[in-house]
Amino acid sequence: MSDIKEILSGICPEIEFTEGGESLQVSVPAQKWHDFARQLHDDPRLGFDVLTAVVGMDWKESVGVMYYLTSTSRGWDILEVKVVADDVKAPYIHTVSDIWHVAGFQEREVYDFFGIRFINHPDMRRMFLRNDWVGHPLRKDYDADPKLNPIRLDDEVNEDDTCSYVEDEKGKIKKVPGKVFAENDYVVNFGPQHPSTHGVMRMRASVDGETITKVDMMSGYIHRGIEKLCEGLTYPQILHFTDRMDYMSAHQNRHCLCACIEKALGLEVPRRAQVIRVMMDELMRISSHLLAFGCTAMDLGGTTAFFYGFREREQVLDIFEKTCGARMSMNYNVIGGVIADLHPDFVKDVKALLAIMPERLKEYHKLFTGNIIAQNRLKGVGMLSKEDAINYAITGPSGRGSNWSCDCRKVHPYAVYSELKFDEVLETGCDSFARYMVRMREIETSCQILEQLVDNIPAGDIRALNVPKIIKLPAGHWYQQVEASRGTFGVYIESDGQKNPYRVHFQSPCFNLIGVMDLCCQGHMIADLITIGAALDFVIPDIDR
Amino acid sequence: MFDFGKWTTAFNDFLLGLMPEWGALLIECVLIAVAVLGAYTVLALFYIIYERKLCAWFQCRLGPMRVGKWGLLQVFADMFKILVKEIISIKGTDKFLFRLAPFIVITSSVVMLACLPWGNGLQIINFNIGIFFMLAVSSVGVLGILLAGWSSNNKYTLIGAMRSGAQMVSYEISLGLALMTIVVFSGTMNISELVWGQESAWFIFQGHIPAIIAFLIYIVAATAETNRGPFDLPEAEHELVAGYHTEYSGITFGFYYLAEYLNLFIVSGIATLMFLGGWMPLHVPGWDAFNNVMDYIPSVVWFLGKSFFISFVIIWFKWTFPRVRIDQLLAFEWKYLMPLALANLVLMAVFVAFGWHF
């Protein structure tokens, strides 16, 4: 760690290091940030090629952004960079979306919720809220008066308008208006109500005949402001939100939040609870990938395969129902462990599932994967190179389909994953077929993990006994990642010592996935837009948190 | 074999005894119109439940089970629902063309239905260019689809209609060539002569290799002609919501729905007529006893049975295969299917010239 400090100080002497955090933290002056970021990315000694999370912050007397950077070449080291805007009234920070493309959408979200404008960002629109929204909701001085933002019944105006902020030589910032689509583009709208947007998502595609020239993703139709709600609730009360983000990764998301709080409290989770959590995570992953298989087939027009995937998914949901009492939104993990012990049938049911899965997977491959039409529709469609996957921080099955080894279970092992034998699934195709195949093979991997655990569930407590009655986190901030079904899910918690968090940020994998839709779809056909969406497999509530 | 011609001739003579010829013709025309429309409705209802049950079977489900025994009355409920639904008129549409389009589609399919040989002596239109006439009428249907897509003033419908136009015009060529192969073999376009030409054995057996190839080409092209999966791009619901009929509601939508099912029956009926002997029972040359037993099964049952079987195969396609993409669809037709159909036509001509057939 000390050598990296020297390198960083050598690049930019103005930076300050903060001690005591879980990973190395530096503060960079806003003026120096863009050049410093360029060095962080390009310098071969540092190689911070992944922008893991962008967390907007309002510290009352100042506003700024926390950037979480990861270096794949340096053993997945995490670097926290704190950038504070100079002026709290009209905050500006230089964009890094030209260095890490993933920042393109992330910074739009920060702008939307904190009002921080990013200089040189090519498309500085709001991400979730309407153009005519008054205020920036995650600011601490936000006025939530319904008179300011009534429920509007009229259409959004100027949805084609965008702008960027440019700095001239004297340092004066100027607003440059722009348009999303050109004047004569033939723009086809998909959603928010559409059969294959997998939720309430809106895509606008300009087409030339059947060929797509640009895709504009518009989200926010089901945004629930979870991060804002969390600030007013206690820690046990915010847990249930995670089940409602990516409902296909409910267990993993909640595992992540619980782990983050446990890390902050310094709680030791009993081994039985750890094993149960991992088993639930893997069952959830199987269920999610089965749904992804069914929906991919369905989006390609193969309706029958959908039912085959759902038939096995039923069995997983039955297991959840017996132990957790619910089939969706299970609310199973709690701070320090899990809420209830396993159902007596659990081991038997899991074994029954493991017994049928290999046969059923063969059946799927026979019905759909091997089909010549399916192969022609998926292969070579939506190419995403490994470099782009890293730059856009596309984790999970979609990133591994581009041959990027990014499995959080391997690079930042948590719970009992370090003790388990399993191989990370990688495909070299970089296309939709590769992403699809990663999911199919990950079902096998999850079965393999479950097989190792099902007979070795240790006896003991299901919850740590020393969980405080009133949970107050010490002042500070924490970041925890887990491998959810669709990629790396991260939770950022900042606490000021109260019983409710000062700021919670959920870094959802699907938010990054929609960032590559435009890149992947260009030059393909309208039908491929649906294929690419299906193969990336985004879940809308995870984007609209 | 029972000849329905006896009944129809007797009825005609009876009418002629009562009134002048124009009166008899008028009454016969009205009766036939009622019969055709009745058959149209009944077949559509049958096909809806047929496809739903088959689809459920392929998908490990039961299908409709609540209304009536095994859900058999479900289609009637659906029909009444669609009849009483509001026909929504939409701002910005071309009102006249928007209302006209479904009628063009349904008229074309009703006329085709009237040409089919339903049984021995049960044929409404029978003239020397029968199969050519059917092909000509079938291509009118695409006009209705194009008009629907254009007049709806909606981007989905327009893309759907353009896809449909490209697809149906392309696949019509293969379809026609496959049928022409059989016309070359039989030497006639007259529908009743085509059926009688298969008395000794069905054309698919008589013409062996080129006939079988023509049959396979026909089945693929016919699936595309009826806009059914895996060629259902014009109404690809995952891309274009409902394609060219997105803006239609109530019975105007119902017309497209009915026409789709009836076109399925009609292409199956043409396949039956051209390759599987029409209403002709299964005859094997030399097996007289077997042939006599087969003749006891009524000709109508033969025709419907064979048609339903072909429909079953086409439905099976739909619920198994994913959808192809528009460039793949057109490349398949123009690069593979049409050259193959042309080559097959030449092959059949050679076979006929040298007499290499049964």
Image: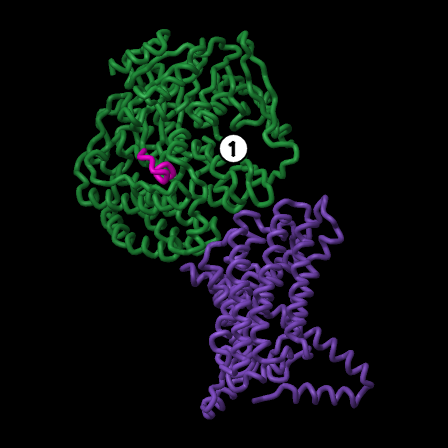
Q: Which chain is green?
A: A
Most foreground residue, A498 or A15: A15
Q: Is residue A288 above or below residue B167?
A: above
The residue carrying mark 1 is A219
Q: Residue at x 42, y 51 (%)?
A: A375
Q: Image quarter for residue B123?
A: bottom right
Q: Is residue B318 above or below residue A424?
A: below
Q: Residue at x 74, y 89 (%)?
A: B13
Q: Which chain is purple?
A: B
Residue B231, image x and y in percent? Answer: 53, 57
**Main SS of residues in magenta:** loop
Most foreground residue, B157 or A42: A42
Q: Residue at x 32, y 53 (%)?
A: A361
Look at label 1 and name its amino acid. Ser
Start-end of magenta stretch? A398-406
Q: Is residue B210 above or below residue B7?
A: above
